[in-house]
Amino acid sequence: MIEVRDLVKSFDGLRALDGLRLTVPTGAVYGLVGPNGAGKSTLIRHLAGILRQDSGSVTVDGEPVYENPAVKRRIAYIPDEPMIYSQASIRDIRRLYRELYPSFDPERWEKLAPAFGLDEKRPIRKLSKGQQKQAAFWLALALTPELVILDEPVDGLDPVMRRQVWSLLLSDVAERGTTVLVSSHNLRELEDVCDHVGIMHRGKLLLERSLCELQENLVKVQLALPEGAELPEGLDILHESRTGRLRQLILRGKSEELTATLQKAGPLFMDTLPLNLEEIFIYELGGADHEVQNILL
Amino acid sequence: MININFRDARPIYEQVRDGFRQLILTGALPADSRLPSVRELAGQLAINPNTIQRAYRELEQEGYICSAPGRGSFVRRGDAAVLARRAELLERWDALSGELKQLGLTEEELCRRLKGETHD
């Protein structure tokens, strides 16, 4: 769906995006994670066709996005700060969207109304920050978009509304194969909703993986070996720590195969533990050093 | 029906899979009953539909459910009781054999016993 190749963008000599490459498959829920200032919002503004790149390419289904209405009308974009005419009411914006987006579905608009419970006649500026965000979701979902781009979407939403919004979005993903790209500085927030994750740091994408393949390829094992016994050869050990006889290993490979191999060493005790997403990325990014942890937290 | 605990260290697809396993084994979901559709469950739990798809795929491979294209996924008839008993007994076997190993029996000795080669 989205292909970004060698994207470079500088602002006043500062390289905000530095040769970034990114691929989002159709129907994926792609989480873009990175610390403040990594370039997430700048990248997203390129994907939404707001910024023009210095070099490189940004395409959706093979078409460039910048100044391309045919592509942009299939995309719903919710920026981190609401950028709508603040004098207008929700109803005014709805009218504008109906003009701009041929895919706007009035029936769906009505159906979604009870989920948000907002007064259509109220001027946007009289809504709270969270309500403005809700209004943005209501409008975006009524567009029946093929691609939804969300910049820090749940900022300012209460936990109940957060869940409501994800529930609506993910139903859309299941029903119509909508592609979603969502940014956050918090990996944990994305863990339950994404199936692909990309990690950004200083204008580059450090790592891009599908969660399915990630979870299957790393295993945490706790074991104690008898006196004098050694670990079997040929293990791909990413990390090892020891407390007395108890070892904790992070291994690359399939859980069943690894336990079978380790059994050969005759462990006194062995337990495999699941890794959470944060741990997986810390080890994938090359160890538990502080710099890496700071990127993820 | 299924609860997702975000503090649980298990990946979400495993929580969904294990949740349904338990519902099927205990008979809370009887044979031929329909599982919620991927869309329903994704909306209800606010989790990624691919995660649910993956849990369903594993349940199907393990023989708990079968899916009829266009109609949904259903609990398989007949196997549930056997599966339940088997799982229960295997769990007890694991605990027993583990304890025997800690008491000094080797895996080979346990295997021989399993094959009926020792009489003591």
Image (spheres, grey):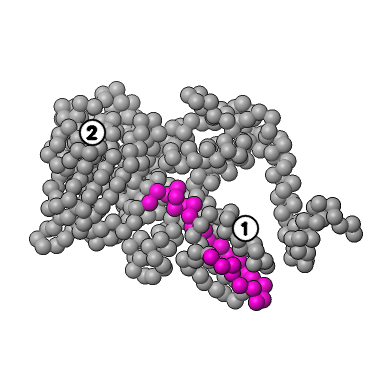
Q: Secondary structure at mark 2?
A: loop
- Magenta residues span A209-234
Determine which quarter of the picture holds residue A161: top left
Q: Position of residue A242 (x, y in %)?
A: 55, 73
Q: Residue at x 17, y 51 (%)?
A: A56
Q: Secondary structure at mark 1?
A: helix
Q: Quadrant of the C terminus of chain A?
A: bottom left
Nearest to N terminus: mark 2 or mark 1: 2
Q: Position of residue A66 (x, y in %)?
A: 14, 42
Q: Position of residue A14 (x, y in %)?
A: 14, 62
In this image, B63 relative to B101: left or right? left
Q: Position of residue B15 (x, y in %)?
A: 54, 46
Q: Residue furthest right?
A: B120
> Quick one: A150 or A250, which is closer to the camera?
A250
* Host chain of mark 1: A
In this image, A25 relative to A104: left or right? right
In this image, B117 relative to B33: left or right? right
> Quick one: A72 or A186, which is closer to the camera?
A72
Q: Quadrant of the N terminus of chain A?
A: top left
- Which amino acid type is shown beneath numbered disc 1? Ala
In this image, A270 relative to B42: left or right? right
Q: Residue at x 64, y 67 (%)?
A: A265
Dot 2 corresponds to which residue? A74
Q: Is residue A2 above or below residue A214?
A: above
Dot 1 corresponds to which residue? A260
* Host chain of mark 2: A
Q: Is residue A210 magenta?
A: yes
Marks 2 and 1 belong to one chain: yes
Q: Residue furthest front?
A: A234
Q: CA distance from mark 2 to mark 1?
A: 50 Å
- Is there any visible trace of residue B81 in the rendered image? yes
